[in-house]
Amino acid sequence: MHLDKLQQAKTFLLDYQARLCAKLENHEVSGKTFLTDPWERAEGGGGISKVLEGGDIFEKAGVNFSHVMGNKLPPSATANRPQLAGRPFHATGVSIVIHPRNPYVPTSHANVRFFIAPAQKEGEQDIWWVGGGFDLTPYYGFTEDCRDWHQHAKDACDPFGEHLYPKFKTWCDDYFFLKHRNEPRGIGGLFFDDFDEGGFENAFGLIKSVAEHYKDAYSEIVTKRVNSSYGERERSFQLYRRGRYVEFNLVWDRGTHFGLQSNGRTESILMSLPPIVEWKYDYQPEADSPEAELYDTFLKPTDWLA
């Protein structure tokens, strides 16, 4: 039975990867397209990394599919299910990180994934779950973009239970938080893991809905902001704020840790990092500036749909 679930997940994920890349390429006026890089993992499985670099719209965009398997789940995957430690597993998913060139277009991230630890002996059951979500990391905030983003998040969840959006929004706010900076990474969205509510069809339907709503939500913001004019000041602030993205992904992100602990492909795992970034010592934005507004207004947990 687990092979049927796994095949359904892989079929959707590969199709979604292709459709999302095509949609992003339609934004890219430079004519740049995604490099397709298939890879194999010695311990079992592999994936397809798709990366676009140096575009006029997207300075770096990665849309990675992976299906890895092994005889022992790594610690990052059993943190909430210690009874599965050491059990064989399959993990498949699509992970997306997009770093735009224009500072008025936010960085975005999304991920949908399916894990299964198949039964090993009579009397055992397959144990499976799904996870995923999406979040937005603006450099210059716009209230209407935050509202639209969160409306898409709510619309993705509501058909599967109206309790899910507030739960997953809070989870996202808590997860994408840089503890060492005491600061959110962005304006949030959705985050969930270890989800099997309502059976496979319901849970699988949720991650499909989340993936499709991400595709539309981010495309709408790109279209709206991509022609905003900017100068050296905005670009410098963007590069500084990208440093927070690097810090979170390397220090706190469970997906990064899982990939490295399971001997995943390092090039694909670290695809999430931006191509150019700056760190400044003890930087403080000028009071009442657009840069200060990011901290004072947007980098705070907010009910954007209130």
Image (cartoon, rainbow, N blue to C red):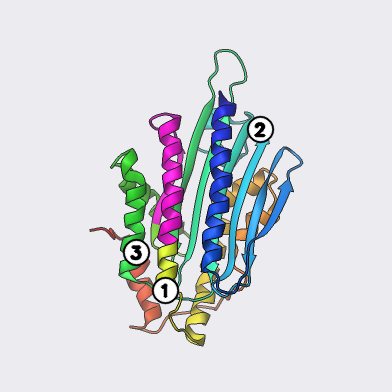
Q: Nearer the viewer, mark 3 or mark 2?
A: 3
- The dominant secondary structure in magenta is helix
- Whole-percent x and y of residue 66? 63, 45
Q: CA distance from mark 1 to mark 3?
A: 13 Å
Pointer 1 local density, CA inside 10 Å: few below 14, some 14–19, many at least 20? some
- Which stretch appears magenta? 189-218
- Whole-percent x and y of residue 156? 37, 48
- Whole-percent x and y of residue 5? 54, 30
Answer yes or no: do the residues labelled 3 and 2 have beta carbons within 8 Å? no
In front of the other: 211 or 113: 211
Whether residue 79 is situated above or below residue 48 in the rendered picture: above
Q: Is residue 205 magenta?
A: yes
Q: Secondary structure at mark 3?
A: helix
Q: Secondary structure at mark 2?
A: loop
Residue at 57%, 39% in the rendered image: 11
For the view shown, which residue lies furthest in the right direction? Answer: 42
Toward which corner of the image does residue 261 lie, by quadrant?
top right
In front of the other: 279 or 124: 124
Answer yes or no: do the residues labelled 1 and 3 have beta carbons within 8 Å? no
Q: Please state which amino acid type lies under the numbered disc 1.
A: Arg
Residue tagged 3:
146
Q: Is residue 184 visible?
A: no
Tell me the number on the disc at residue 72: 2
Whether residue 190 is situated above or below residue 232 in the rendered picture: above
Q: CA distance from mark 3 to mark 2?
A: 40 Å
Pointer 2 local density, CA inside 10 Å: few below 14, some 14–19, many at least 20? some
In front of the other: 132 or 23: 23
Q: CA distance from mark 1 to mark 2?
A: 45 Å
- Whole-percent x and y of residue 158? 31, 44
Residue tagged 1:
225
Tell me the number on the disc at residue 35: none
